[in-house]
Amino acid sequence: MKVRVRFAPSPTGPLHIGGLRTALFNYLFAKKHQGAFVLRVEDTDQSRLVEGAEQYIQDALSWLGIPPDESPAHKGGHGPYRQSERRAIYEEHAMRLVQEGKAYYAFDSTEQLDALRKEAEAKGEKFIYNHNNRDGLHNSLQLSSEETSRLLEEKHPFVIRFKSPADRQLQLDDLIRGRIVIDSNLLDDKILFKSDGFPTYHLANVVDDHLMEISHVIRGEEWLPSLALHYLLYEAFEWEAPQFAHLPLLLKPQGKGKLSKRDGEKGGFPVFPLSWGESTGFKESGYLSNATLNFLALLGWNEGVEQEIYSLDELKQRFDIDRVNKSGARFDVEKLKWFNHHYIQQASNASLAATLQNTQAALSAADLESLEHFVGLVKERESFIADIYTHNTYFFESPSSYDPKALKKQIKEDTPALLAGLAAKLQALEDFKSAGLSDCLASYCEEKNIGLGRVMAPVRLSLVGALKGPSIYEIMAFIGKESSIQRIDNLIQHTS
């Protein structure tokens, strides 16, 4: 059987980073086995649809570099790929189950069911609509066929419920969790279809997976409670079930509880791949797509070796569902930053310079070749693209203040005079490049019979405003003679 997997999100808002991890694992599994990765949009709950959410999902997959082989935008032979366009298919299959006695019409009102729940709660019990009580409720199992037909003709509100079996020990298999045993007496008769013409998730999911020839269903752990029903639906339709794998949850940075949007707001990190409304995404926060992909791949999967850096091609070759963990994966923000730092170092200066030019208004008119040189000087220390500029603005503008601790430590009584003498020597220097500047400062200190440190630190302070940054010779060569001397003069005036 050809491997075919699907990622089936609901367009009810932005895609959570946990959903993107699910998409990634599906994609890697498909590519490992030369299979197909399908994007199916599960938009049957029309009341919760959010405009722009479907496009957001496709944009997020594109940004991560895992485009689907089939989707609403890339049609294959198994469409339509939006569930709202498949309503007639679901109705046909729901009717089939009713006709075969495997499902039934239920006309119970919300008020009636609420009353039964309250009655059960008063007895310390839980109301479950199943074989224990369905024959005594308002449904086609106890109504005559004539009464059932009348209610349907009169457009009486109804749902179609699955007729779950009694007294069975269901043997379910999961590629990650192994054998799971479920007592069918604990299952309720789930709603499959509603009178508004839309199916519930359960019916649509199973019908679509079968008709789209999905071989493996790889989804989040939160769908484990649905596994028994889905197995029973495959059995009811007399279809072969796909293989199931339920991925571990993404946990809070502290390691307890499911990662949520609120955790990101409290911790100051994104939980969406792209920005949505007031929520800043991974991309806009400065995380590179390949760093994010590498980080997500290791959230719940481990090859069993010490390697942590993986290219997408390596992941396609080496991903194995058998190496996915059962336990939740902690969302380690510092590890994510570590990955981002690594990939920034690996990125070309040209690509980083182009990004800065497009995202930093102050650099929009900057010479691209100069920007590339600047990036090469400072990127080693940075973990985010934006920080390449914001942490090193002194390359483009004179410091407006000086680190007070550095001033107190580095500025001596004779420092202004030494800096003035150096400025004069720099003014006469023709070779204002790194090597020439190094020779100039060395010869000046030799003339004055002082150590190089007597002027190096004050010069750095004048150029940067603090004792940080790359070689002062590289900084001076970049900003030029006029700006270098002006900054030295500014510090002289500030300390005189």
Image: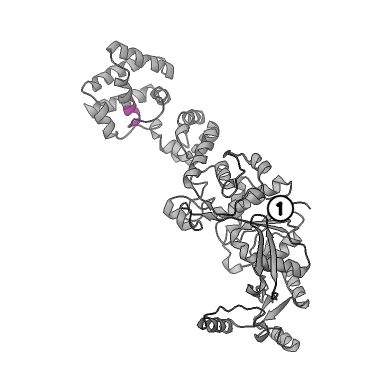
Q: What residue type is labelled 1?
A: Glu
Residue 207 counted in the magenta span: no
Which residues make up the magenta segment? 459-468
In the image, 207 versus 63, the foreground residue is 207
Where is residue 453 shown, x and y percent of the image? 31, 21
In the picture provided, is 104 more to the left or to the right than 371? right
| Residue at mark 1 | 70
Q: Can residue 86 be seen in this view?
A: no
Where is residue 484 shown, x and y percent of the image? 35, 24
In the image, 179 versus 193, the foreground residue is 179
In the image, 122 versus 105, the foreground residue is 122
Q: What element carries label 1?
A: loop
Where is residue 74 shown, x and y percent of the image? 70, 52
In the picture provided, is 484 more to the left or to the right than 184? left
| Rendered position, 85 above or below 118 | above
| Rendered position, 227 above or below 20 | below
Residue 467 counted in the magenta span: yes
Q: Which of the 4 image quarters holds residue 241?
A: bottom right
In the picture provided, is 105 more to the left or to the right than 114? right
